[in-house]
């Protein structure tokens, strides 16, 4: 993941459950103490360390994943159609 900075926004929301990001979150909050960090934990995952660091936390549900998916087929700007794989 690329490093993120809270200089261009008031808050950042990460969708993760990966403890490897805890150091980056700590650095961002130390460098920009007025910034806020929100976390959305992937379905079936939770991380106590990340939850402690976050100003806001939520758990994603299977329904959320379904709502965030693009339609089965979308039309690109050039008129071609892009079809979502059946396994998604």
Image: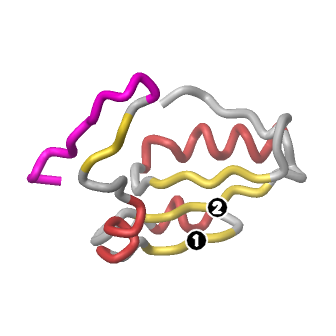
Q: Main secondary structure of the magenta part?
A: loop
Task: Residue 4: name its quadrant.
Answer: top right
Please state the horizontal and vertical placement of residue 58, each as a whole percent of the image.
Answer: 52, 74
In magenta, the rendered stretch is 77-88
- Image position of 1 with respect to 68: above or below: above
- Image position of 7 with respect to 34: above or below: above
The colour scheme is: secondary structure
User: Circle 1 — which element?
Assistant: strand
Q: Is residue 68 magenta?
A: no
How many neighbours does mark 1 have within 10 angstroms: few (below 14), some (14-19), or many (20 or more)? some
Q: Residue at x 54, y 26 (%)?
A: 2
Q: Is residue 82 magenta?
A: yes
Find residue 46 and name its label: none
Please state the horizontal and vertical placement of residue 31, each as a whole percent of the image.
Answer: 83, 37
Tag 2 and tag 1, C-beta contact below 8 Å: yes
Q: Earlier in the sequence, mark 2 or mark 1?
A: 2
Query: Residue at the right extreme?
Result: 34
Q: Residue at x 36, y 53 (%)?
A: 70
Find residue 38 and name its label: 2
The answer to which of 74 and 28 lies nearer the viewer is 74
Please state the horizontal and vertical placement of residue 75, each as a whole percent of the image.
Answer: 36, 38
User: Circle 2 — which element?
Assistant: strand
The answer to which of 68 and 75 lies nearer the viewer is 75
Mark 1, residue position: 57
Please state the horizontal and vertical placement of residue 28, each as a whole percent of the image.
Answer: 73, 40
Task: Residue 38: name its quadrant.
Answer: bottom right
């Amino acid at each position: 993941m690329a490093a993120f900075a809270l200089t261009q926004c008031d808050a950042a929301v990460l969708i993760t459950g990966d403890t490897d990001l805890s150091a980056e979150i700590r650095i961002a909050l130390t460098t920009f103490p007025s910034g806020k960090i929100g976390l959305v934990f992937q379905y079936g995952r939770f991380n106590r360390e990340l939850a402690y660091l976050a100003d806001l936390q939520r758990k994603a549900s299977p329904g959320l994943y379904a709502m965030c998916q693009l339609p089965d087929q979308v039309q690109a700007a050039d008129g071609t159609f892009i079809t979502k794989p059946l396994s998604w």
